[in-house]
Image: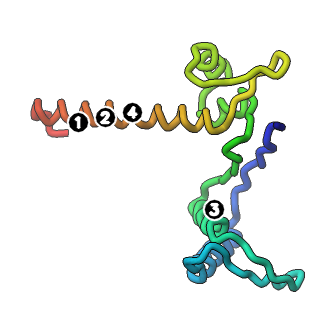
């Protein structure tokens, strides 16, 4: 499996933000409850059938763009390089390689290079989030018991 090509983020100008806002609003308003939706594309004069789930994703992408957030899509079964995985986790590549060597994230070798499944990186990130949530809950409980007023 090839490494996915990650598109460089594009920051929108005010006109593009307004187009994204209006597109999101109009698209969200016409989404039905069925499994597919029919769209008419004016440029090209074609009609097409699209899974409603894909349209919901498009609405989410447009909403993120309106908020000024860059959006990148990565297939769940994509294999990433150690640099791409480190960037996703917002850590250095040497730190990420250490995580791999400690067995905290599964990987495979292609020649001398390590490849990591996106779903494994995402699962690791989710486990960190869950651990952080538990630690914060415990600290909150302790501060309430001690009457620290936090």
Any mark on residue 61, and which? 3
Q: Residue at x 14, y 36 (%)?
A: 144
- The image quarter containing residue 22 is bottom right
- The image quarter containing residue 30 is bottom right
- Assess whether mark 1 and mark 2 are in contact (beta carbons under 8 angstroms): yes
Cα separation, mark 4 vs mark 1, equals 12 Å
Between discs 3 and 4, the one toward the N terminus: 3
Q: Residue at x 70, y 41 (%)?
A: 77
According to the picture, the residue beneath numbered tag 2 turns out to be 136
Cα separation, mark 3 vs mark 4, equals 27 Å
Residue 14 in the image: above or below residue 4: below
- Assess whether mark 2 and mark 4 are in contact (beta carbons under 8 angstroms): yes
Any mark on residue 140, and which? 1
According to the picture, the residue beneath numbered tag 4 turns out to be 132
Q: Callout 1: helix, strand or loop?
A: helix
Tell me residue 137's x, y (percent). Answer: 27, 36
Report crowding for label 2: few under 14, some 14 to 19, many 20 or more residues within 10 A (C-alpha): few
Cα separation, mark 2 vs mark 1, equals 6 Å
Q: Callout 4: helix, strand or loop?
A: helix
């Amino acid at each position: 499996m090839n490494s996915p090509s990650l598109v460089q983020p594009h920051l929108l100008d005010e006109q593009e933000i307004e187009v994204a806002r209006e597109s999101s609003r109009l698209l969200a308003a016409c989404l039905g409850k069925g499994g597919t939706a029919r769209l008419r594309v004016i440029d090209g004069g074609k009609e097409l059938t699209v899974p409603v789930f894909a349209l919901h994703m498009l609405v989410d992408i447009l909403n993120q763009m309106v908020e000024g957030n860059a959006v990148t899509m990565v297939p769940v079964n994509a294999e990433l390089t150690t640099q791409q995985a480190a960037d996703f986790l917002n850590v250095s590549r040497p730190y990420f390689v250490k995580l791999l060597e400690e067995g905290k994230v599964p990987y495979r070798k292609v020649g001398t290079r390590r490849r990591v499944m996106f779903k494994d990186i995402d699962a690791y990130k989710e486990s960190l989030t869950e651990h952080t949530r538990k630690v914060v809950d415990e600290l909150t409980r302790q501060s309430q018991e001690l009457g620290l007023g936090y």
